[in-house]
Amino acid sequence: MSVQSSAAQSNIAEALQWAFSQLAATSDSAHLDAEVLLLHCLNKSRSFLYTWPEKPLTLEQWKRFQKMVQKRQQGVPVAHLVGEREFWSLPFIVNETTLIPRPDTEILVETALNLPLSDNAKVLDLGTGTGAIALALASERPKWQITAIDKVEDAVALAKANRANLNFPQVEILQSDWFSAVESRDFDLIVSNPPYIDETDEHLMQGDVRFEPHSALTAAEEGFADLYHIAQTAREHLLIGGYLLLEHGFEQAVQLRNKLTELGYHNVATVRDFGSNERCTLGRWFG
């Protein structure tokens, strides 16, 4: 990596151009990465970059920006570098203990919100990670009785930190191996974005996922193990007429629809994401 002398004067426009030149070969979002990292160093809004392009960086800002660009060039996710990722227009604290919320998962949130549920529906989010799904739902349906669970203690702590930061105290967050902490409870809606990547997938060694816990990404049985376990066990925890809504890989939709139908779910359907890929599948349980 070519690092400019820390003694060199650099303004905002020059810093952005330098960062882009460093990141262009390693990131497919080099311009955006450079902006987000510089904004974090400056603690300013995006409009500031274009309003004051000739404003010089302080020596401390410039050194910090260089270090962050270098780490990004090595592949460290931007979200980990700035400690935050926006999801459903909400700022979520993120770290290396769980997955970074993806834009495609907003399709799952949108689909859940469009279901004909009561104002006080009981909702379970399995494998909540940062708490993104549960807290996004709470932001739109404050009267829903939402429970979010995760097996990993550090993920539970992170979800609780996001709950406090976003001020949704009504969301219950528990440590649980799937349904173990809610064995005696039933729900109107169960949602999950579980691990669904094949353990042998070559993409696990590429991009941001190299820095995320593979336990939150991969599953046995060519990625279907957790999807199938949830689908099978959810039947014991859904109220009559309740919904199961699962995120999955774009090539898993047909097989998952067949599995839900085989398990006795009704009205099984798949929703496409922003890229027109089959991303979430739902079914309704009538017992």
Image: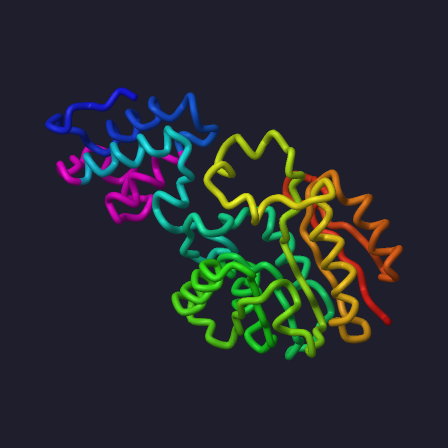
- The answer to whether residue 52 is left or right of residue 190 is left
Magenta segment: does it hold 46?
A: yes
- Quadrant hosting residue 275: top right
- Name above or below for residue 233 compared with residue 122: above
Given residues 230 and 242, the one toward you in this image is 230
- Name above or below for residue 130 compared with residue 82: below
Q: Quadrant of the N terminus?
A: top left
In percent of width and height, residue 109 lies at 62, 58
Residue pictured at 49% horizontal, 57% vertical: 130
Residue pictured at 69% horizontal, 65% vertical: 190
Q: Quadrant of the C terminus?
A: bottom right
The residue segment tinted magenta is 32-60
In percent of width and height, residue 272 lies at 71, 45
User: What's the magenta bit mostly, secondary-structure-wise?
Assistant: helix
Given residues 1 and 59, the one toward you in this image is 1
In percent of width and height, residue 32 lies at 41, 35
In percent of width and height, residue 215 lies at 56, 48
Residue pictured at 74% horizontal, 57% vertical: 229
Magenta segment: does it hold 42?
A: yes
